[in-house]
Amino acid sequence: MSDPRITPSIFTRGAVDLGALRSAAPTPARPATGAPAGTPAAPVPGGGGAVTVIDVTEATFQSEVLERSLTTPVVVDFWAEWCQPCKQLSPVLERLAIEGGGAWVLAKIDVDANPRLAQMFRVQGIPMVYAVVGGQPVDAFSGVVPEAQLRQWLDAVLKAGGVEVSTSEDPRMAEADDALMVGDLDAAEQAYRKILAEAPADKAAEAGLAHVTLARRVSGADPGSALAAAEANPDDVDAQLLAADIEVLSGQAEQAYARLVAVVRRTAGDERERTRQHLVSLFTIAGPDDPAVAGARRALASALF
């Protein structure tokens, strides 16, 4: 696993046949608030009404994604109304798009309404996010990622599109994140611990250290086998903990939280406390502002008391 923080990219250059779509007239964009297509794109405060978030269909894909990406990087968000992880990721993407002031455009594609587009991009699970620059996909990831890592990914997309990116990134955090990204867990742990020694309340470093621990726990595990084992043995606490780890890395954090809350309800003593601590460590990865974490904390409190 090259980047334990993010579900590994399934993008392979040249694997997406964008030439299969025919040109069609575009439809109006929509605002980031979720209003239906046909209303103007989300305006940028003080930004002269730059387009930031648009709904895209098969008929408008060429004009709104391919042609637009020739001048402005486009981030394509494959989502569905029933997808709970999408409800975690999409609002963050929309907020960052508006914050970007038109430097890049978020194109949202409902997979239920546009199955052919999802098939073309070989979308096997959602949320699935592609970056399109110069008329071609350049990178992708699936699942929910922390905002800090999402910002880093977007910066890389903007640089690929020739957009100047100015950041005031902490070089210590960059070093730690880089080590984590290449799988050097020992170096990443050392770097995160150094930051925490100097700033014990640094939430980003706490999350990074939790990612290191999670990456070590799942090292060598086969996701399919682990999930099957957990399904077959609901009372096996170790199997449930590993399955929850894999679900978090697969963008199914809410499912992982619910799994462990259920284990807390069924267990007692040391097993219950071990499960509680494991669940809290997963909360650290997502961060305290994640709405899924808030809901899971309430469920955990109910299970405990």
Image (spheres, grey):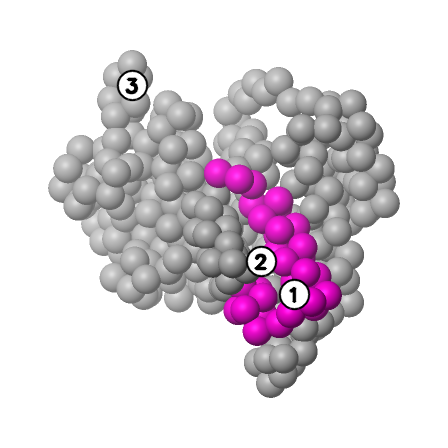
Mark earlier in primary sequence (2, 1): 2
Q: Secondary structure at mark 1?
A: helix
Q: Is residue 180 above or below residue 45?
A: below
Number of residue marks: 3
| Magenta-drawn stretch contains 158 | no
Answer yes or no: is residue 23 visible. Answer: no
- Numbered range of the magenta stretch: 260-289
Label 2 sits on a secondary structure element that is: helix
The structure residue drawn at horizontal position 73% and vertical position 24%, both measured from the top left corner, is 199
Q: Earlier in the sequence, mark 3 or mark 2?
A: 3
- The residue indicated by pointer 3 is 45
Mark earlier in primary sequence (1, 3): 3
Q: Which residue, given by chain and number where applicable, does mark 2 sit on? A: 248
Q: Amino acid at mark 2?
A: Val
Tell me the residue at 56%/41% (across/down).
Answer: 287
**Residue 272 image label:** 1
